[in-house]
Image: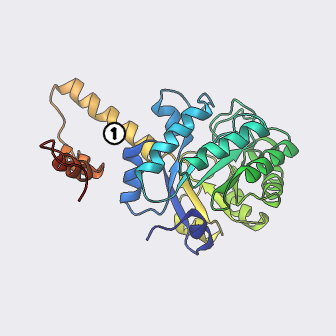
C-alpha cells in the first residue's frame, strides 16, 4: 500500500527520498522500493542545461513536477526554490504544485536568484520575510495533506543559531518539516534535531556541507527525512561521459549493463499502451467491455 506524505511523517521509519528529475529517474526510485521521490531542483535545472542558480521559472519547475507525480504512485516532494516572488507568488506556487498531484514542496529563504545550497556566496532574506512567505504558503494549500517544508540556508551565512531560529519560526506558523541546509559540519548536523521544535530533514549531498551519509546514523540523530538529490544526477552524468568517451575512442558501441529497450519500455508502462493498441487494432472496438 502506498502511504501519503503525511502518513510517512507520522510513522517511525526514516523517510529516504532520492532525487529524480524526469520520469525515468522517478520510476527508478520507486522501483528500488523507496517510499518517496524528491524532485531535485538541481537535477531539473541540469536537465534543461543550466546550473542550479535559480534560472528556471515556476512554470518550468511545476511542469517537471507534474511529470514526476504522474509517473509514480509514491508521494513526490518537489523543490519550489524561493517561491518565485512575494506572498502572492508563493500562493500561486503552492496552488500550482498541489493541483498537479505533488505531495509537498520545500521553500527556502535565499535571495532570488538563488544558488545551490552547497555553494558559497549565498544570501538570505530577512527572517521575518521568510516567516511571512511560509505563512502564505500554509494558508494557500487546500489540504493539510500537502506538506510544507521550510528550508533555511542561513547556517552558512549567519550561523547555525540563526538558521534554527528561522525554521522554528516557520514551524510556529504552520510549516510541517524543518530543513536546515548546509549545516557545515557533522557536529552541526547532529545538533539540529535537538534544537528544532518539529520534524527535521537533512540534505545528503556528496562533497557538500552536511557531511553525514549513513542513513542509520541520520535516523539515530532524530531526523525524519533524508534527501539524496545528487545520487542519480551525478552518477548518471559520469556514466554517460564514460560510455561516450569509450565509443569515441574505440569506435565500438560499449556493451555494459544497459537495460534492453523492451525492458526499459516495460518500466515506462508499455503493457498498458499495448493493451489499448490491441483493443483498437482493427478499428472496430468501441472502447466498451
- Left or right: 168 with respect to 31? right
Count up the numbered dots. Answer: 1
Residue pictured at 30% horizontal, 48% vertical:
268
Q: Position of residue 135 (x, y in %)?
A: 80, 51
Q: Position of residue 187 (x, y in %)?
A: 70, 59
Q: Quadrant of residue 58?
A: top right
Considering depth in this image, is 286 or 210 the residue closer to the camera?
A: 286
Question: Please, which colouring scheme is shown?
Answer: rainbow
Considering depth in this image, is 250 or 36 the residue closer to the camera?
A: 36
| Quadrant of image for the N terminus | bottom left
- Left or right: 270 with respect to 142? left
| Quadrant of image for the C terminus | bottom left
Mark 1: few/some/many CA within 10 Å (<14, 14-19, 20+):
few
- Left or right: 231 with respect to 129? left
Q: Quadrant of residue 193?
A: bottom right
Q: Position of residue 176 (x, y in %)?
A: 70, 61
In this rendering, the answer to whether 50 lies above or below 274 is above
- Would you name the residue on which mark 1 appears? 239
Q: Secondary structure at mark 1?
A: helix
Residue pictured at 50% horizontal, 44% vertical:
66
Residue pictured at 24% horizontal, 46% vertical:
265
Extreme residue toward the left, this view: 282
Q: Position of residue 247 (x, y in %)?
A: 21, 28
Amino acid at each position: 500500500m502506498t502511504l501519503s506524505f503525511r502518513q510517512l511523517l507520522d510513522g517511525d521509519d526514516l523517510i529516504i527520498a532520492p532525487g529524480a528529475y524526469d520520469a525515468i529517474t522517478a520510476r527508478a526510485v520507486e522501483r528500488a522500493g523507496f517510499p518517496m521521490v524528491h524532485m531535485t531542483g538541481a537535477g531539473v535545472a541540469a536537465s534543461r542545461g543550466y546550473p542550479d542558480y535559480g534560472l528556471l521559472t515556476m512554470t518550468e519547475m511545476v511542469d517537471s513536477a507534474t511529470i514526476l507525480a504522474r509517473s509514480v504512485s509514491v508521494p513526490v516532494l518537489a523543490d519550489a526554490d524561493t517561491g518565485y516572488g512575494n506572498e502572492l507568488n508563493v500562493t500561486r506556487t503552492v496552488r500550482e504544485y498541489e493541483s498537479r498531484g505533488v505531495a509537498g514542496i520545500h521553500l527556502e529563504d535565499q535571495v532570488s536568484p538563488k544558488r545551490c545550497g552547497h555553494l558559497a556566496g549565498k544570501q538570505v532574506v530577512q527572517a521575518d520575510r521568510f516567516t511571512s512567505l511560509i505563512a502564505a504558503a500554509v494558508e494557500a494549500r487546500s489540504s493539510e495533506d500537502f506538506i510544507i517544508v521550510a528550508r533555511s540556508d542561513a547556517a552558512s551565512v549567519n550561523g547555525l543559531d540563526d538558521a534554527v531560529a528561522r525554521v522554528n519560526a516557520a514551524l510556529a506558523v504552520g510549516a510541517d518539516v524543518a530543513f536546515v541546509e548546509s549545516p557545515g559540519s557533522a557536529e552541526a548536523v547532529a545538533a539540529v534535531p535537538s534544537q528544532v521544535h518539529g520534524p527535521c530533514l537533512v540534505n545528503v549531498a556528496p562533497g557538500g556541507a552536511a557531511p553525514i551519509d549513513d542513513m542509520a546514523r541520520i535516523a539515530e540523530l532524530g531526523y525524519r527525512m533524508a534527501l539524496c538529490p545528487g545520487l542519480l544526477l551525478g552518477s548518471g552524468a559520469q556514466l554517460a561521459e564514460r560510455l561516450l568517451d569509450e565509443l569515441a575512442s574505440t569506435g565500438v558501441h560499449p556493451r555494459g549493463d544497459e537495460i534492453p529497450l523492451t525492458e526499459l519500455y516495460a518500466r515506462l508502462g508499455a503493457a498498458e499502451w499495448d493493451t489499448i493498441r490491441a483493443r483498437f487494432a482493427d478499428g472496430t472496438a468501441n472502447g466498451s467491455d
